[in-house]
Image: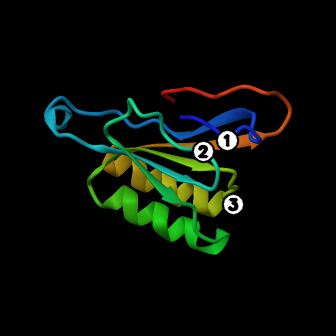
Amino acid sequence: MRTNPSMQSVHATQVTHATHNAQASHIQKWQYLLSDTICFGKDISTGIRIQKPDANRVLPWVMKIITSGQAQSIYIENHQFDEKQTFMIQQAAQLCSVNVTLLNITQDTNNVIIGPW
């Protein structure tokens, strides 16, 4: 993932870590990024960047992506979920074998951020 020059450092918080079974591993799944300022690098062929919706719409979007059956990972830029929302995401993500990571970006250095996370 890459940031705009004004967005400098990333702190990633793993909300869930799904375990994938061997039977599902051959199916091509997508990595989703809900973001205002960062994007996937050009070498990520399975990445879909979606402009992050308003804060009150992030949870429904994340739940739809998780339950679609098409997601491997979801990365969410600068968003906080409450305990109930986090529990809902964890339950759905474990059931559907999806990793969810929160990316908290701060402006304190002048680096380009590259991952997989």
Badge 3, how many Cα within 10 Å: few under 14, some, many 20+?
few
Whether the residues at callouts 2 and 1 have beta carbons within 8 Å, the answer is yes
Instruction: Between label 2 and label 1, give the one nearer the viewer.
Output: 1
Residue reaching furthest to the right: 108
* Label 2: which secondary element: loop
Q: Is residue 63 above or below residue 105?
A: below
State which quadrant residue 112 falls in.
top right
Pick whichever, 16 or 43, lies toward us: 43
State which quadrant residue 52 falls in.
bottom right
| Residue drawn where x is 39% and y is 37% of the image | 18
| Residue drawn where x is 63% and y is 28% of the image | 113
- According to the image, label 1 marks what residue? 4
Q: Amino acid at mark 1?
A: Asn
Q: Is residue 110 above or below residue 37?
A: above
Instruction: Between label 1 and label 3, give the one nearer the viewer.
Output: 1
- According to the image, label 3 marks what residue? 82
